[in-house]
Amino acid sequence: MTRLIIWRHGNTDWNAASRVQGQTDVPLNDLGREQARTAAPLLAALRPDALVASDLSRAADTAAALSALTGLPVRSDARLRERHFGSWQGLLLTEVAERFPREYARWRAGDPDPGADIEPLDELGKRIGTALQEAADQLPGGTVVIATHGGAARQGCGHLLGWEHAVLRAVGSLRNCHWTELRHDVERGWHLRAHNVGPMEIPAAATGTTATGIPVSAEPV
């Protein structure tokens, strides 16, 4: 049985401020680095055989925390980047709502192609899903940890599972440094084993930064 652990990166200052990251290369903050260090032993206990990461630094540096424990090299794959958010990248969500009210309403309603040069969900799912499948194909019967992004993780998993957009909207967003586990066998194909698994939340006071991300009802950006 092949196992994929799809791991969202740690917290960033843009997560904390509800600023749209998309494919902007925003680094981990102190909280995010601590989240990665805390999650790494839990993932190491799963005895991964390979480690792959988005080439954006917040995912690559999250993966590096696990690499330091396991000795596994991190293979970079640009296909694992977050959804491209077009004209919204770099804006606060409040600014998006003011400047792009029609597209913002469509996005919040779950429109898979809301405009504003945002990458359509079908394209995102295919891009991420293909990268996940290829990572699994390279290590049949093994465990592969994939460090990626929140929206990317959800659509990539949905692509492998064959889930429609309406089903995926009912699946909770991955918290920072939490993961989804998929397993594959010949009889059942891909199936969901676990979702939003990870360490206890690290209090903001311990790191000197806010622990809050974007609103729970919104897609990770």
Image (cartoon, grey):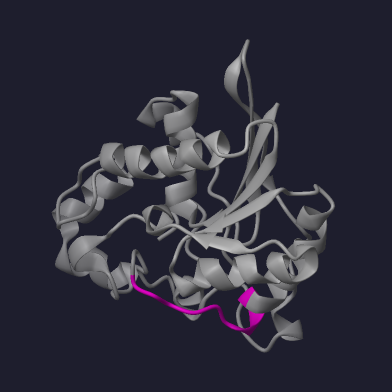
Res. 138 in view: yes
Q: Name the image quarter holding the C terminus.
A: bottom left
Confirm whether the magenta stretch covers residue 78: no
Residue at x 17% of width, y 58% of height: 101
Res. 218 in view: no
How many numbered circles does the render carry? Answer: 0
Residue at x 84% of width, y 52% of height: 45
Left or right of residue 209: residue 94? left
Instruction: Tell me residue 123's x, y (percent).
Output: 27, 41
* Dominant secondary structure of the residues highlighted in magenta in the image: loop
Left or right of residue 112: residue 21? right
Task: Using the image, determine if residue 212 lies above or below residue 182.
Answer: below
Left or right of residue 139: residue 202? right
Residue 178 found in image quarter: bottom right
Residue 29 found in image quarter: bottom right
Residue closest to the eye, 217 or 72: 72
Residue at x 71% of width, y 76% of height: 34
Residue at x 82% of width, y 62% of height: 41
Task: Using the image, determine if residue 206 lies above or below residue 121.
Answer: below
Residue closest to the eye, 110 or 182: 182
Instruction: Tell me residue 220's x, y (percent).
Output: 45, 57
- Furthest toward the top, the residue is 187
The range drawn in magenta is 24-32
Residue closest to the eye, 90 or 158: 158
